[in-house]
Amino acid sequence: MVLNNFVVFEGIDGAGTTTQLKLLQEKLAGYSKTKSFFTFEPSPNPTGVFLRQVLKGEIKLHPDTIARLFAADRCEHLYGANGIAELCSRNTLVVCDRYIFSNLAYQSTECGADLPRQLNEGFPLPQIVFYFDLEPSVSINRIGGRGVTEIYEKIDFLEKTRRNYQSIMEEYKDKTQIVHIDATQSVEAVFEKIWGIIGNLPIIKA
Ligand code: TMP
């Protein structure tokens, strides 16, 4: 099932999804007739906050437990009070930094493909996925500038995760709209591509 009005940004760490989400949020602030909501996973809910500690390496858990926690966080993010599903049904454009594809790409690197698939198969697909692709060597350089390193921010891990993303995008290309972004381009060029699609959605033009 595809959830209308739901858009996600995906890509390996350092691909620039968060920067683009903020630019889109600023742009849509000027569209008073369109209701929009910007969010991210791991979510701001308690399970997501706990996962941020796991990502920083402060809490060590079995990889299968981590996969299950990401899925549990997603379930609440989608179906909890004022969650994504409810907002989309009320004609709000919801844009989320990461979703099931992160679970399928990252957790498959650690747990194999079966568990992430099983955990995510019941969740609705977004209307549009923007997939930001770039070489991990480039993304690792960008992340280095931030000063804080998380558990997945290692070149070998991101190489495998990128390959997983590429095959997942191929697998999902007929199930939802997937837009490939060359994430080595300038911030402005990437935004232009995103706005070329979002700016033409009926929910924006109405
Ligand atoms: P970010 O906030 O910088 O995007 O970092 C979130 C990290 O969490 C990133 O390394 C990807 C990872 N992640 C997963 O491994 N599985 C998931 O399901 C999600 C949502 C994120």
Image (cartoon, rainbow, N blue to C red):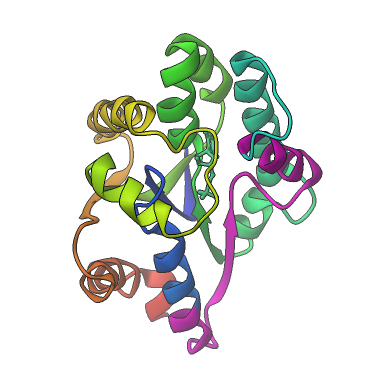
Quadrant holding the C terminus: bottom left
The spot of residue 100 in percent (x, y) is 49, 35
**Residue 29 to residue 202: above or below:** below
The spot of residue 187 in percent (x, y) is 28, 71
Q: Nearer the viewer, residue 18 or 153?
A: 153
Q: Which of 184 and 6 is in front in this view?
A: 184
How many numbered callouts? 0
Q: In this view, does 206 lie to the left or right of 36?
A: left
Q: In this view, does 55 lie to the left or right of 53?
A: left
Identify the image quadrant of residue 109.
top left
Q: Give the range drawn in magenta.
A: 26-55
> Can residue 94 be spotted in the picture?
yes
Q: Is residue 85 left or right of residue 141?
A: right
**Residue 178 to residue 193: above or below:** above
The residue at 53%/12% (across/down) is 115
Q: Nearer the viewer, residue 2 or 37?
A: 37
Q: Which of 40 and 66 is in front in this view?
A: 66
